[in-house]
Image (tube, grey):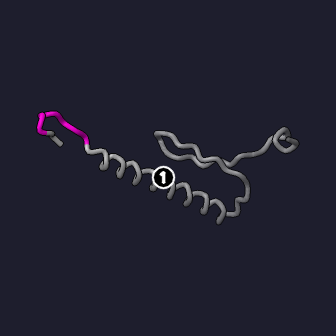
């Protein structure tokens, strides 16, 4: 948007809307991955790792230290 002074101003509501939409899609993908793993019979703990290359859904195997703590 160009103001009366001739300077440009960014409409932040558009950016917030886009970010919100992206976050919603990421959350949907995570929920789907968890539901799919549970449907396949997985009952353990999982960790979701986000990266620029995609989302990774990794099982977490507790160590002896974790089990005794």
Using the image as rendered, state which of residue 68 and residue 60 is in the foreground. 68
Q: Which residue is mark 1?
A: 26
Q: Residue at coordinates 64% horizontally, 47% vertically from top-left?
A: 47
Q: Secondary structure at mark 1?
A: helix
Please state if 3 lies on the left or on the right of 42 as rendered: left
Q: Residue furthest front?
A: 4
Please state if 7 lies on the left or on the right of 67 as rendered: left
Q: Is residue 59 above or below residue 43?
A: above
Please state if 48 lies on the left or on the right of 42 as rendered: left
**Residue 9, x across and y down, in percent:** 22, 38
Quarter holding residue 65: top right
Quarter holding residue 41: bottom right
Q: Residue at coordinates 56% horizontally, 59% vertically from top-left?
A: 31
Q: Residue furthest right?
A: 68
Q: Is residue 34 above or below residue 3?
A: below
**Residue 5, x across and y down, in percent:** 12, 34
Q: Is residue 53 magenta?
A: no
**Residue 2, x across and y down, in percent:** 15, 40
Q: Is residue 19 above or below residue 7?
A: below
The total number of labels drawn is 1
Which quadrant is the N terminus positioned in?
A: top left
Q: Is residue 6 magenta?
A: yes
Q: Residue at coordinates 51% horizontally, 40% vertically from top-left?
A: 51
**Residue 53, x across and y down, in percent:** 47, 41
Please state if 22 lies on the left or on the right of 30 as rendered: left
Which quadrant is the C terminus positioned in?
A: top right
Q: Residue at coordinates 35% horizontally, 52% vertically from top-left?
A: 17
The range drawn in magenta is 4-10
Using the image as rendered, state which of residue 39 and residue 8 is in the foreground. 8
Main SS of the magenta part reads: loop
Residue count near mark 1 (Cα–Cα under 10 Å), binned few <14, some 14–19, many ≥20: some
């Amino acid at each position: 948007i160009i103001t009366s002074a001739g300077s440009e101003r960014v409409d932040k509501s558009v950016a917030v809307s886009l970010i919100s939409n992206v976050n919603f899609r990421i959350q949907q993908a995570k929920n789907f991955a968890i539901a799919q793993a549970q449907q396949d019979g997985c009952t353990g703990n999982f960790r979701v790792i986000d990266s620029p290359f995609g989302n990774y859904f990794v099982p977490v195997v507790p160590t002896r230290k974790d089990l005794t703590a």
